[in-house]
Structures are given as C-alpha cells and as structure tokens.
Amino acid sequence: MVVRDRGGQLRAFLNTCRHRGARIVSGKEKCLKAFVCPFHGWVYGLDGTLKGVTKDYDFPGLDRSQYNLQALPVAERGGLVWIHPTPGAQMDLDAYLGSIGDDLEQFGLDALVRHRKTQVVKNANWKLLIKTYLEGYHVPHLHRDTLSQAFRGGVIAHHEHGPHIRLSAARTNFLDLLKADSADWKILDYASVYYALFPHTFFIMHPDYVSINMFYPQAPDRTIWTHEMLYRPSAFEGEAGERALAKRFTYTNDTVFDQEDFAVAEDVQLGLLNGANEFHTLGLAEGLLAIFQRNIDEAMAAVPASAGTGAVTWMRPIMPA
C-alpha cells in the first residue's frame, strides 16, 4: 500500500493486517482517512500506526506499538514512486539506476498524466514476453503492417547499467540527423528509447507518451501483464486530443503488444511442449536476449539455496495514485 498522508509524507506498507493477516486494501478505494481491515475492523492510521482494536478487552496486555503495519522503503525519483518489497531493506536509487535515473528525469516523466492502465493474464512465461521487446530482428516481419512503417529495419543500439538495459531504436527519419544542427537534436524525434529495468519492467519512451509495462509471473506458463500509458497533456488537447490518445492506446496495447508481440510469445510457449527444439538459436541481432538471460542466471545464482525464491527481492517502480 502506498499513501501520501495529509502532510504530504509518502509512505509504503505491506498490505497485510497485523492481527490475522488479511488483505487491507483492495485497490478499489477512492479516498481513505485510515486503513481498516475488512476481516475484524482493526484500524491503522495513514502513518501505519495501529489506532484501534475491535473489542480491545479481548486482547489484555496488547502492546499496540508492536502491531503497526510493516513499513517498506519508499522514495521518489524521475516522476515515479519506487518501493522495495522487503521491510527494513536498503534502497539506493542512485546506485540502482545510475545514469538511467538521470534519463528518466530528463524525459520529464513528472509532467506526464496517466491515460489508462490495463491488467491482463498472458499464457506465456514472463521472460518470453519481455524478450519480444529486446530485439528488432522481428520488426519487419511480425510488425510489417504496424511498427515497421516507423522504424528502419529494426536497427537498435544499447547501453547497460548493471542488469538494466537501455535501447534506442532508429526511426525511418534517422538519417535526417545529418541535415539538422546538432544543437537542436532531440533523441525522441529520431528514435524510440526503451528501458528494461531488471528484472520485470519495460519503459517505452515516445515524444508524446510513455508506456510502462510490468510482468508478474504466476506460473511457468502464465504471467500478469500490466500496461500503463502516460501522456504529455500539451500533445493531446481537447476532444480531438482525447480521441487521438484513445486511438494511440488501442493501437499500442491491443494491436502491437497483445495481438502481435504477445500472441507470438504464447505460440512459442505452446511450442515448448512438442519437443521440436532442444534450444532456441540466437543471431547477432538477438544478443540482448542472451544478456537478459545471463542477468537472470546471475541473480538466481546469488540466492542462497536454503532461501528459496522468496529471498529474491527487487525494487518495483509504480506510479502514484
């Protein structure tokens, strides 16, 4: 649970009552003056302190200070709210993001407005879904009627910071840079910029909007995919702007992502069952898939064998409500 209290203080908590462990917030709430557990009615302030216990005489000697909500590390950077899902963990965003943090601030995400967010379950492994973003080799073919019209044959350059990857995909007008004054260059006029924030988040930067995609594994062959579009208000003004924005979201979310990229990923997932391939073959243009997989393998190898998968914790970028 992420909340800003009346004084503007940003806080984050595990969404779990300290009494019997019920989920406190469903996500459908519009405005809260306090957190109230739906199971037994225990009440917590927006600062996480336990304020009220139903029939408190049933809990003689209860030290309320020991039953506050479990707080999580939280910070703001680049127009986003960042949390760490482990209470008491250390979170150094400068070290985590490096120069990518500077990029996010330069793109002015704090001036963008949310248009829409969707949540869909896809029948594919989360890594297969992300890997559709990490190479341009497929663009002229899978996206021949959509993205291939805007990009030059899937040409991509990349930069790494730790396990994170930044990609720049050249647009069809890229060579116009040679005719323009370098002092006037703006990268989003000639390329789309992508950020794969390890392990499960993918930003896509466009001149007038940003897509934030996140992938949450449910099973080896099932993933929750969320897509949130943020837009620059000056680029979509009035009723005509609203219609254009809705059209852009449908094109990006429904056509390019869902019906093209992720439909193929689901087909690949099915193909894993028939045994036709013992392995997948990567060409030079698909090298980022190997880099991404290497980062996953290294992260998993760093987890003590006795800890189980629950010991792997990552910072998860989320947008403020």
Image (tube, rainbow, N blue to C red):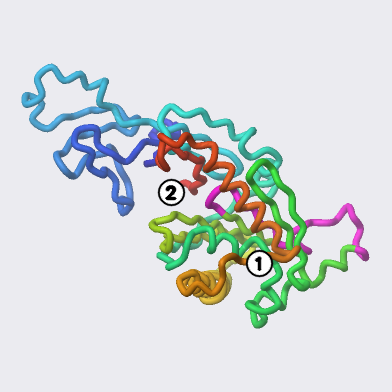
Q: Is residue 247 visible?
A: no
Image-based side of 259 in relation to 180, left or right = left
Question: Is residue 310 in view?
Answer: yes
Instruction: State the image coordinates of residue 313 (x, y, percent, origin top left).
Output: 47, 39
Q: Is residue 98 left or right of residue 75?
A: right
Could you tell me the amino acid type at mark 2? Ala
Furthest residue to the bottom? 145
Direction from residue 28 to residue 311 in the image, left or right? right
Which structural element holds mark 2?
A: loop
Question: Would residue 275 be counted in the magenta stretch?
Answer: no
- Identify the residue at horizontal 87%, vertical 68% (top origin): 175
- Which residues are the magenta region? 178-201
Q: Could you say which is closer to the camera, residue 148 or residue 211?
A: 148
Q: Quadrant of residue 55?
A: top left
Q: Which residue bears the numbered disc 2? A: 321
Q: Are marks 1 and 2 in contact (CB under 8 Å)?
A: no
For image coordinates 22% across by 34% down, the residue present is 43
In the image, is residue 250 above or below residue 316? below
Image position of 22 with respect to 147: above or below = above
Question: Between 109 and 170, which is closer to the camera in this rendering?
Answer: 170
Query: Residue 26 or 320: which is nearer the viewer?
Result: 26
Question: Residue at horizontal 47%, vertical 29%?
Answer: 89
Q: Amino acid at mark 1?
A: Thr
Tell me, yes or no, whether the highlighted magenta stretch contains residue 197: yes
C-alpha distance separating marks 1 and 2: 42 Å
Q: Mark on residue 281? A: 1
Q: Judge the density around disc 2: few (<14), some (14-19), many (≥20) Cα neighbours within 10 Å.
A: few
Q: Element at badge 1?
A: loop
